[in-house]
Amino acid sequence: MTCKEALISNPKLDSESNNKWFKRVSKLTGLHHKSLNKYFYSHREFVEVKRSYDKNGNVVSRTEKLQQQQFLDPKDYGLDVVGLTTNISQGTQWVKTSKESQNKAFFKLNKDLIEQTLKEVNLKPLEAPKITPTSNKVLKVTYTDVHVGLNITENLYGLRQWNEFELMDALQKIVYYVGEQFNGQSKIIIADYGDFMDGWDAKTTRGGHILDQNMSNEEAFKVGAQFKIELAKRLAKFGVPLEFYNVTNDNHSGSFSKIVNIHVKEVLSYLLPEVKYEIFNDFISHYFVGNWCFICSHGKDEKHLKYGFNTKPDDKAKTHINRYIDKHDLHKYRIVCEFGDKHQLIRDTSHAKFEYNVYWALSPASDWVQTNFADGRRGFCIEEIADNFKTFTSIQL
């Protein structure tokens, strides 16, 4: 990334000095703040802003000001400009861009940095075994609401912790129970339905109250990425193709989860190049398993849907689902709608057009949930899927 691209992608904020601007962009891009400073000030020229004359009309003095040589066109930003003010006489330009486009630029920047870092590490592919499947059935593992970084202190229902060690213990149980049910299926699918991270800077995507956490952003990133990479490495030992589907549009993780999953996807592209790893940024997404279509969502989004999908499909949920089915022309498939968020396990097969499932959280109940509601159960689920039927197993932790 050039200095020009860095400054364009990260416009100067209101009331932000040039030095603070350069240092902020330096942290985001890895470019030295002095390089940004040099580029900015080297692309200016003296422009006459005032001229004085005597009574005969002769110029007796001129005042020049050092200002930008040229002003940027809004389309050069690569962002959605919602406000632009240019003062030619003063040589200043203020640009306001939409938060959504800023987020997209931020994710692209992180993705570029991750890719470059991994290339420098020079990771080598792992030697994973390969077997010939004995059936066309598929094993699907579903977990949700991992809340990496969540701190539990109340323990109203006995000793309960949630940290790196407990998370890796849950990983071992997932691999163990997959092994118990694996008998030559054609592939293994792993679905994560959101709130994988507890929150950036101890806040949800909507801000507000402070979350009680036991990890810094950096520690949580490392633990979350390690969990997903290690899970892929261990499941790869079964010798069949792996497919990961990750919902990141949720009310706790949001951007944090997106960045973690981008990192994991890039690492796996080196370690296990044949792994399919999908990151779902939309509120509702879907994927196919034979004759089945799994419509998935966390249940609450990053911004708008505060109350989300309920444990049972109300009229609002049915409208969302039916419109989604119509939009993507999914009528010929067996539809299964799946959600996280509620920290409950509920299967509803009473609807003619679709099955409606809500899944347990992998993490224990937070202090707030324990105090205001109840402890609840936690765990994950494994399904064996064939063309016309599927079996369902829930594993409580």
Image (cartoon, grey):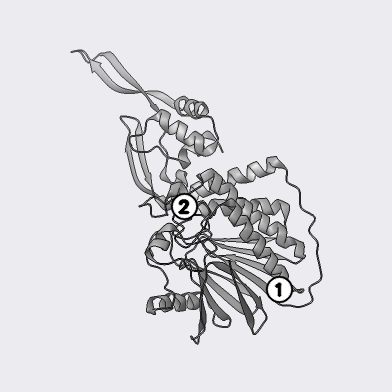
Residue under label 2: 199
How far across and how far down the image is residue 274, in percent? 72, 60
How far across and how far down the image is residue 153, in percent? 46, 53
Q: Residue furthest left?
A: 55
Residue under label 1: 181
* Residue at point 74%, 74% (across, down): 185
How far across and how far down the image is residue 255, in percent? 49, 52
Up/down of 238 relative to 288, above or below: above
Up/down of 350 relative to 204, above or below: below
* Residue at point 78%, 58% (across, down): 128
- The answer to whether residue 68 is left or right of residue 214 is left
How far across and how far down the image is residue 230, in percent? 67, 55
| Helix, strand or loop for disc 2 | loop
132 and 60: which is toward the camera: 132
| Mark 2 vs mark 1: in front | 1
292 and 157: which is toward the camera: 157
| Helix, strand or loop for disc 1 | helix
Up/down of 139 relative to 275, above or below: below
Quarter of the figure with the C terminus:
bottom right
Question: Any mark on residue 381, and which?
Answer: none
| Residues tagged 2 and 1 counted as in contact (Cβ below 8 A) | no
Quarter of the figure with the N terminus:
top right
